[in-house]
Image (cartoon, rainbow, N blue to C red):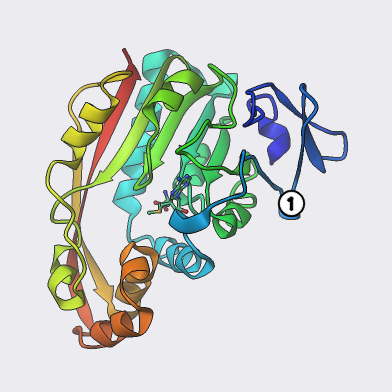
């Protein structure tokens, strides 16, 4: 709920603190701007109108919700939560200090809510550019507050207010991450690796994940961050039926690039069940 995190939120225009009014219907900045809280309990904190070109649409968010609820990515969620625990340990932050964990591009909140279940007392901020995602985020966990915002711009968060930032298959903004993290805070990033879902590339005509994504992440963050230890490769095999494969494809960037009827036609040619490789790397970054 936004009440849990209103001490963390800031006006996207000038960074001044935002406070929730007594009936939780709007946020007011100390410089006099107001932002309404939408029905399910999220706020849109953007300077301009939301340009949702990169945001997941309702169909993609529904596919994500269905696919993740089947537990196919359990090793990824365990790895992200484990890395958040390590980051909090490194910073010496105890669970009862109510640490703030912010996920950027949080989607349905699957990863964030799992982490909050594990870190008793922690509070979550779920940020996503997609309104359908924010609707799910607002109700994904009692200790999550949901915000529609564009991670490419100034984040609607106060300076030094967040203990850990997580980024799972989503965009990064290292300059802003460095601004909003508390001293000792870390970023935990899950990045798809070359070979992820490789068995589907040819039959569905979707692009492979390029090599070197982690190196690129470290390089592009190097003005603000340095890696903590070695990146951890998480690799496993999933046995999926045709319907789960269609759901996976429906939540992925392919859903945007290939017409849905063509994708469905290709998916219908796949065997009833397939073993697919899941491959991603968890990287932890701390401020230099
Ligand atoms: C691949 S999905 C990952 C969602 C979630 N992390 C998960 O793994 O279940 C990427 C998410 O980032 C969001 N997104 C894309 N561009 C964004 C931006 N500029 N700012 C904030 N969110 C963005 C999309 O709407 C989508 O929910």
Q: Quadrant of the C terminus?
A: top left
Residue underneath mark 1:
38
Q: Is residue 185 left or right of residue 220?
A: right
Residue 232 image point, x, y percent: 20, 36
Q: Residue at x 43, y 63 (%)?
A: 64
Mark 1 vs ligand 1: CB below 8 Å = no
Between residues 35 and 65, which one lies in front from this camera angle?
35
Looking at the image, residue 113 lies above or below residue 120: below
Q: Residue at x 70, y 22 (%)?
A: 17
Regarding residue 248, the answer to whether it shows in the image is no
Q: Is residue 50 left or right of residue 250?
A: right
Regarding residue 32, the answer to whether it shows in the image is yes
Name of the residue lying farthest toward the right = 22
Q: Residue at x 52, y 41 (%)?
A: 117
Residue 170 image point, x, y percent: 38, 46
Residue 94 image point, x, y percent: 50, 18
Q: Residue at x 26, y 72 (%)?
A: 240
Looking at the image, residue 188 lies above or below residue 194: above
User: Quadrant location of residue 172?
Assistant: top left
User: Quadrant location of residue 183?
Assistant: top left
Q: Quadrant of the N terminus?
A: top right
């Amino acid at each position: 709920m936004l009440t849990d995190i209103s001490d963390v939120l800031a006006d996207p225009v000038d960074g001044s603190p935002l406070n929730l009014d007594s009936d939780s219907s709007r946020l007011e900045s100390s410089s006099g701007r107001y932002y309404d809280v939408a029905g399910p309990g999220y706020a849109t904190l953007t300077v301009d109108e939301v340009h949702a070109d990169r945001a997941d649409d309702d169909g993609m968010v529904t596919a994500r919700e269905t696919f993740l609820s089947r537990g196919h990515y359990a090793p990824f969620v365990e790895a992200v939560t484990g890395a958040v625990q390590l980051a909090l340990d490194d910073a010496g932050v105890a669970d009862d200090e109510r640490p703030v964990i912010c996920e950027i591009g949080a989607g349905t909140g699957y990863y964030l809510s799992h982490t909050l279940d594990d870190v008793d007392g922690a509070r979550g901020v779920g940020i996503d550019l997609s309104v359908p995602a924010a609707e799910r985020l607002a109700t994904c966990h009692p200790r999550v507050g949901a915000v529609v915002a564009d991670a490419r711009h100034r984040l609607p968060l106060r300076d030094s207010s967040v203990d850990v930032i997580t980024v799972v298959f989503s965009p990064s903004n290292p300059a802003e991450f460095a601004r909003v993290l508390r001293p000792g805070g870390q970023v935990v990033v899950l990045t798809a690796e070359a070979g992820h879902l490789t068995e589907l590339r040819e039959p569905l005509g979707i692009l492979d994940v390029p090599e070197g994504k982690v190196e690129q992440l470290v390089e592009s963050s190097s003005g603000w961050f340095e890696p903590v230890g070695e990146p951890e490769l998480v690799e496993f095999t999933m046995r999926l039926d045709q319907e789960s494969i269609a759901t996976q494809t429906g939540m992925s960037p392919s859903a945007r690039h290939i017409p849905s009827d063509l994708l469905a036609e290709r998916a219908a040619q796949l065997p009833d069940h397939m073993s697919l490789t899941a491959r991603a790397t968890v990287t932890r970054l701390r401020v230099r």
